[in-house]
Amino acid sequence: MSDDKKEEEVSLGAEIKDWVISIVIAVALAMFIRTFIVELYMVDGPSMNPTLQHAQRLVVNKFVYRFREPERGEILIFKFPKDQTRDFIKRVIAVPGDTIEIKAGKVFVNGELQNEPFILSKTRGDYPLSTVPEGTMFVMGDNRNNSEDSRFPDVGFVPFELIQGKAMLVFWPLDEWQALP
């Protein structure tokens, strides 16, 4: 075998090795980002109308709640308590230590009537005065009358450990792009 042929094979081997290393690093980096920093989700159903529409795609920050607890008004993704293979998206209405009550279609947090310009229609039904336990939150969909949320026993007060992340951005469809509160 000629020296030129040997050099060519060595060069090709080095190039393949470089490509393999680059691909492995890219895959590892993508997995790290998806596991710990951001993930993409799709809205499934009408429970967050009019804020979010069915089939919109979201960027979800998985990192933020490692440093702080959710705040009232934030929209987040969490695992459904009764079937943790399902993800839910809802708005945080009350946090640990808050009182929550719904009467005559109005939501009260810590005794104060909430101004909720984002809801689709008046909330049907009542919810008795309750205090949100430590390590949990009370969540509701913006489409109150078509949302399975903390008012229902299958959801109840959502434990922090079920939180997947904070919805930050609608990125698809492009004409519906928006930053979320």
Image: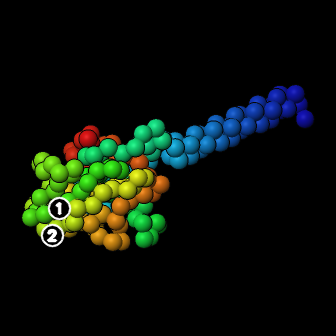
Q: Nearer the viewer, residue 116 or 16?
A: 116
- The quadrant of the image that shows the N terminus is top right
Residue 145 — which label?
none
Tell me what residue is drawn at x 27 percent, y 42 percent. Answer: 180
The image quadrant that residue 150 belongs to is: bottom left
Residue 125 — which label?
2
Q: Residue 11 in the image: x percent, y percent?
A: 76, 31
| 18 lies left or right of 101 | right
Q: Nearer the viewer, residue 31 or 22?
A: 31
Tell me what residue is drawn at x 77 percent, y 36 percent. Answer: 13
- Taking the image as drawn, is residue 39 in sight? yes
Tell me what residue is drawn at x 87 percent, y 27 percent. Answer: 3
Number of numbered discs visible in the structure rendering: 2
- Mark 1 sits on what residue? 102
As displayed, is residue 2 above or below residue 138?
A: above
As displayed, is residue 122 above or below residue 175?
A: below
Callout 1: few (<14), some (14-19), or many (20+) C-alpha neighbours within 10 Å? some
The image quadrant that residue 29 belongs to is: top right
Labels 2 and 1: the sequence-earlier one: 1
The image quadrant that residue 137 belongs to is: bottom left
Tell me what residue is drawn at x 63 percent, y 38 percent. Answer: 25
| 166 lies left or right of 140 | right
| 44 lies left or right of 82 | left
Q: Amino acid at mark 2?
A: Gly
Q: How is the image coloured?
A: rainbow
Q: Amino acid at mark 1?
A: Ile
Q: Residue 63 in the image: x percent, y percent?
A: 46, 41
